[in-house]
Image (cartoon, helix red, strand yellow):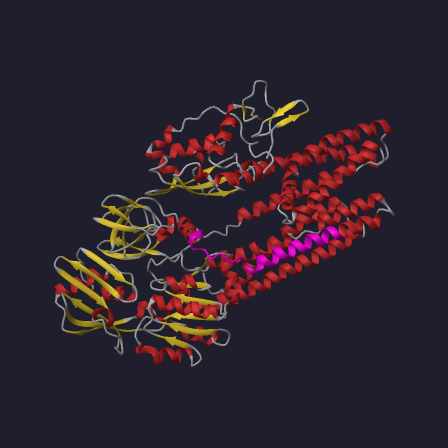
Amino acid sequence: MERSGIIANKTLCHHCGDTCPENHPLQEALSFCCQGCLTVFTILHQNGLADYYTIEQRPGSSFRSRKNKNYDYLEQSEIADLLLESKIPHHHRIRWKLPAIDCASCIWLLENLHKLHSGVQNVRVHFLKKEASILYDEEQISLSQLAELLDKIGYDPELSFANLDQNVKFRNKDKSLLYKLGLAGFGFGNIMLLSFPDYLGLVENEIGIFIGYLMIALATPILLYSGNHYLRSAYHSLKTLNPGIDIPIALGMLTLYFRSVFEILTQSGDGYLDSLVGFIFFLLIGKWFQDYTHYSISFDRNYKSYFPISANVLVGEKWIPKPLHEIDIHDELLIKNEEIIPCDSILLSERGRIDYSFVTGESNPVTVLNNEEIFAGGKQKGGAIKVKVRRNINQSYLTDLWNNEIFSKKEESIASRVIDKVSRHFIIAILFIAVATLIYWYPIDGRTAFNAFTAVLIIACPCVLALAVPFIYGNAVRMMALKNIFIKNVKTLENIQDIDTIIFDKTGTITDNALREVVWEGNPLSPEESTLIVSLAMHSSHPLSVAITEFLSCEPTDLDAFEEIPGKGIQGRIGKNTIRLGSSSFIFGLDNMAKTQEVLVEINGHVPGSFVFKNHLREGIHNIIANLAPHYNLGLLSGDNTSEKHRMQELFGNRAECLFDQKPADKLQYIKDLQQQGRKVMMIGDGLNDAGALKQSDVGVVISDSNNNFTPSCDVIVAAERFEQLNNLFQYADKSKVALYGGFAFSFIYNIVGLGFAVSGLLTPVVAAILMPISSITIIIYGVAVSSWLANRHFKFLN
């Protein structure tokens, strides 16, 4: 796309569009204002990124020639540690403020940064915050080289160690909105003062013409700068043939401006510049208030909320489960097989095998040796390890992992699809009504015609419709987190409303791990045998292994090898001793024919006996099943033997299908089969052997006890003490849908009433501009208030 050229005897830069000086750089018959712009152009073309210039008209306008900066100080590990979010080998992540991010071309270029350097693995841009989260391989590109690369292409990072606190939200936001608001307020006040004598008929013709020119001079920069967001958004919507809600607003602005300029220049009228500037001013006030409200109401779950994740902390000589917010620096933690490392730590054990797939998406475990650093979000593979906490817990980082797009389900929400569809038809209808209003009024009164035309475009806006979902459902998610029921996102809440089938796991879900009774059947265990069993069992976080460890209650010894086979058992080696714990199919290779739930013990090929378990049902499970059965198809999947089949069938009723001896793959396939029948399935498990089924289901729910069983495979985490409130969650989700319909009804009534006044010519553009943000603010207050009231009503007995 040819962009440089000569306009009014001025040569424009091909990259940034600025005027080129004499003796400016040239390349391939293209002009550049400085060597910096030429350098960026060359870099992009050499790497096949020329499309940068086709997305926006002046994509390089934010780039200015600058002095070369020195980033050598970023090579110092002390400084890098302060900046980096994570330091997983070959997967370092940093989040940088890039003030030069200005348009769609900027986003496109930064998210294609890997084409400029293979060491860059992934870039995600947050346009509103002008931030980029960059994942890179430190072996291929250092932190200083990454900064230099960004600087070369015009996006030098803002490096201020005074602003390292990422929890400061609103005050660190881009202040351009305030500048635009200030300019619009200044112009609005002055234009109203200039117009006031004319309203009283006190202005002579010559002075009136001068005042008109002065108002044009004031209104023009306000339209182009303060109203720039709406004009550009409308332009992009038209360019991509994707009608957006800013099209009517931009059309109203341009209509007022050009009609006003025409009347003033031809002396055929006084124009509407006071209405135009007032319109922009009040729009920006509404936008500022919406932004302020959005940043003030935090929908993110953070470490200050009690997240149902705990870790085993060494207190005296015992490992005591503690919630993460009570863990301090230098605490020693015990991380078992398949457990998440909750915070950056130093490894105290000889070695560990850490799976960082939650962070990087790559499943190859990394071997970490004694005294080396391990990072939050990694999962231990193998025997239990001991670590010492190095940094304060950052719970929001684990929440980011939970929301990592690697584990997200890509379906678009039903409400979002409806809103998008309604918005497009809405905009077309509004344009039709506005034009019809103009045609009707113009023969009667030209001024009323343009006022009514503009008022229709302004007052009728689907933004109220668009705000209903994030503020009603978003606040609902926040309220549930306060009740220790953690819903992954708004989409999950919508999915809960569509569920028609609920499948339960048994062990640790229907049954209460804390009340399980353990009995040893077989030859009496010697102290040495008890030590061997505990030393193996303590490395697994499975409820049966935990129960065995607590039952024997003896001092463990170090393990030389460990392996856990999900759904079967565990095995390991201590010196010359080989120990195996598991089902009869795991120990003997035979079908599990036991009439009770048991774990057999094998030591050096000899089976001295087994641990037999008597499970107690969770408190409130009978009421939960009784309340859910009339409304949902219920089922049970268990990896245990059939010893409790009669008991479970009696609990669930004859309509429910209760399957036992189910391996993790069997559970996953069962969920798939139900979905192929058109069912919307919720899987409720303990998150240990159910990861595949939880991820496959439409909504995966984990019931969390004191174990560190956090997994991105699930969509909802319910603290074990809130299990009795499961019915309330379904009721709350349904009532939230009713509240959403109430928001839609408000939007409908507002638009009908507003259009009635606008079409009849009783609504001026300024009043319409005031009412539009007020409607948005009203739906925000409604959404937060109603969802909070419903939460407190349905969970009124919870702290």
Measuring from the top left, give residue 430's x and y in whole percent: 72, 52
Helix, strand or loop: magenta stretch = helix
Camera-side residue: 37 or 193? 37
Measuring from the top left, give residue 570's x and y in whole percent: 24, 63
Camera-side residue: 386 or 107? 107
Measuring from the top left, give residue 255's x and y in whole percent: 75, 41
Kindly identify the residue that appears in the image at 83 percent across and 34 percent down.
Answer: 198
**Magenta span covers which residues?**
404-432
Number of numbered labels in the structure image: 0
Observer able to see residue 296: yes
Taking the magenta stretch, the answer to whether it contains residue 54 is no
Kindly identify the residue that appears in the image at 34 percent across and 67 percent down.
Answer: 508
Observer able to see residue 155: no
Camera-side residue: 720 or 123? 123
Q: Residue furthest top?
A: 23
Q: Is residue 281 left or right of residue 497?
A: right
Taking the magenta stretch, the answer to whether it contains residue 417 is yes
Q: Quadrant of the C terminus?
A: bottom left
